[in-house]
């Protein structure tokens, strides 16, 4: 498996780049926004996905961030969504909008993409909702933890104390305000 490639862009064609590294040129399909902002001669690192369709067709897809790669893989896990459709979705719908559409079960956001009708949009939402909810909770939990640590430090606690208290907060407490109260209880019991 090729996880990432770093090299120089030597060619740009419609929806793909050719990146040369160590004497090899890799044809890598990319999302439109990345394609538009790159230039020949530029050094670029991409996180990649190798798609093997059959014995004769092997394609490499590249993404600027690991988060884009993760969502590409999630989209490809939905039956009926191949790499080409996955890259089209990510070209037209920002990750935050895709996440929101799935969580709010808003199929209109997805049907804007050519090749996705109401039926496929609902299938994407149904198959990815649990996976996206888990991802959203994990990312919001980390942001909340940072807010709690900042609040505790601003109240005069040391950074190490604040981090230690946040680690001891039960995982079922998710809201920032409740986490701060729990952290204060933990710190007052020392």
Image (cartoon, helix red, strand yellow):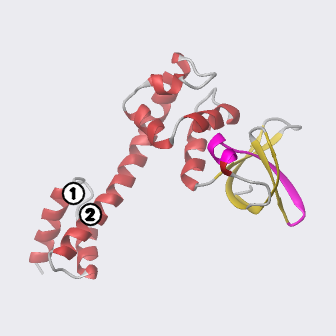
Q: CA distance from mark 2 to mark 1?
A: 7 Å
Does residue 106 sit above or below 186 in this rendering?
above
Residue at 83% in and 35% down: 54
Q: Residue tagged by mark 1?
A: 176
Q: Is residue 66 left or right of residue 54?
A: left
Element under disc 2:
helix
**In terms of depth relative to the viewer, which is nearer, 33 or 19?**
33
Quadrant into which the N terminus falls: bottom right
Range of residues picked out in magenta: 22-36
**In terms of depth relative to the viewer, which is nearer, 64 or 11?**
11
Q: Position of residue 126 (x, y in %)?
A: 46, 28
Does residue 178 sit above or below 90 in this rendering?
below
Residue at 68% in and 56% down: 46
Residue at 53% in and 17% down: 119
Element under disc 1:
helix
Q: Could you tell me if residue 181 is visible in this image?
A: yes
Residue 28: in magenta span: yes
- Of the image marks 2 and 1, the number of the one nearer the N terminus: 2
Q: Position of residue 19 (x, y in %)?
A: 80, 56
Residue at 60% in and 43% down: 73
Tell whether label 1 touches label 2 (CB within 8 Å): yes
Q: Position of residue 78 (x, y in %)?
A: 58, 32
Q: Residue tagged by mark 2?
A: 147
């Amino acid at each position: 498996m090729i996880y990432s490639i770093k090299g120089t862009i030597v060619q740009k064609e419609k929806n793909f780049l050719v990146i040369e590294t160590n004497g090899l040129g890799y044809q890598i399909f990319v999302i439109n926004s990345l394609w538009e902002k790159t230039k020949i001669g530029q050094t670029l690192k991409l996180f990649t996905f190798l798609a093997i369709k059959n014995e004769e067709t092997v394609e490499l897809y590249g993404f600027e961030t690991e988060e884009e790669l993760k969502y590409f893989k999630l989209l490809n896990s939905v039956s009926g969504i191949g790499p080409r459709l996955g890259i089209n979705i990510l070209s037209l719908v920002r990750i935050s909008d895709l996440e929101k559409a799935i969580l709010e079960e808003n199929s209109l956001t997805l049907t804007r993409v050519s090749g996705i009708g109401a039926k496929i949009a609902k299938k994407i939402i149904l198959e990815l909702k649990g996976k996206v909810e888990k991802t959203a909770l994990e990312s919001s939990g980390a942001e909340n933890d940072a807010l709690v640590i900042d609040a505790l430090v601003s109240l005069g606690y040391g950074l190490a104390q604040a981090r230690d208290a946040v680690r001891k907060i039960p995982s079922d407490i998710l809201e920032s305000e409740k986490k701060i109260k729990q952290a204060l209880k933990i710190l007052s019991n020392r």
